[in-house]
Amino acid sequence: MNKSVTVVLAVVVGITALLFGGKFLSHPKEAGLAPDFNLPVLEGSQSKTLQLSSLKGKAVLVNFWATWCEPCKIEMPWLVELQKKYGDQGFVILGVAQDDATDQEILAFAHKMKLNYPILRGDNHMSDLYPSQGLPLSVYVDRSGKVVKRIVGLVSESDMEDAIKKSLEQGSPGGNTASAK
Amino acid sequence: MKTKLLISLAVTLVLSVAAGAQTRDKVTADPISPVTVRMGSRAPLEIRLHVQPGFHINSSQPLTPELIPTQVLFTPPEDLVIAKVQYPAGVLMSFPFDPNNKLSVYSGAVVVKATVLPTPKAAAGRYTVHAEVKYQACDNNSCYPPKRMPIAFDVKILSAGSRLPKAKPTRTSPHIHN
């Protein structure tokens, strides 16, 4: 093959890989360990910050939301009920506000929605750890710290409940530890 | 010949990948026609936005305070004032994520109008006005972070005595048949 053709093809492959690579590789893989974080708690916990890895042994739903996100508002009452229903089985929701609003505005919103789980202040680093184009973003983490499901956008309450059950079952000593698909 | 064909195929591939990356913008703006205004006078300005199919943005007056209004934020040079910014009325719509509630939104084409005025101390000449369109878009089950889209347009200030150039005749739409 002509040398110049080889060079052109190599450049094309390189550019294409760069453009697409970021898109697919930057998302945390399901069944991989959930990226750890330590974020300021606005409400719902005695501690000033909360680290994901400190919740090992529990099933965790990391729910990213914002005050300007209407679909996020729709799922909040479901989350409140699901926290009540599965909390004593070791299920914890962490609400991460990815928002430019002030702490006071976020808290006022959380009070209005009667949220019964810790509200954490998100930041740009979280957007890097858990990249997503849209909100809500729900990342379900099992008791061993592995991501069992990642859902962008609003889904039904029963879909959320199924994912919670999966995260409670997987990663526990007696549960199914197989990788999620 | 073979080499040329391969190169053109490669270029096409790269361009289409790049174009795909650019179509992620939920809102685009048409290029803004230059504005010509005489000292002591005023001229109309139109900014035409397009919300991509499948998306909506909040109107300039959303129904709840948490929602981010669509705004055009102008930063004109000292010689110009952009006044009377007029936004279209929002359309009240409900969406699958909350069929029982309505939101005041824009979708499709959105035209924002304003008036351009030279300040009393303005000097004749050409100016560029920079602005940002602030919006927050959603689709039927997700919302996307607020964005600021930069736009710009040129303004020519003529001295008080000079004549404005004749307006070009409006082109008749090919879809209109008399």
Image (spheres, helix red, strand yellow):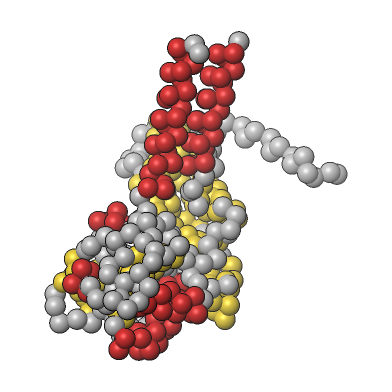
Q: Is residue B38 visible?
A: no
Residue lying at 41% horizontally and 47% vertically, measured from the top left: A23
Q: Is residue A132 visible?
A: yes
The C terminus of chain B lies in quadrant: top right
Relative vertical location of residue A25 with respect to residue B146 in this rendering, above or below: above
Residue reaching furthest right?
A: B178
The N terminus of chain B lies in quadrant: top right
Q: Is residue B120 left or right of residue A46?
A: right
The spot of residue B144 in percent (x, y) is 43, 60
The spot of residue A86 in percent (x, y) is 36, 86
Pick the front one: B56 or A181: A181
Q: How many marks?
A: 0
Pick the front one: B151 or B114: B151
The spot of residue A74 in percent (x, y) is 46, 78
Residue lying at 36% horizontally and 34% vertically, measured from the top left: B123
Residue lying at 18% horizontally and 66% vertically, measured from the top left: A38
Q: Quadrant of residue A99?
A: bottom left
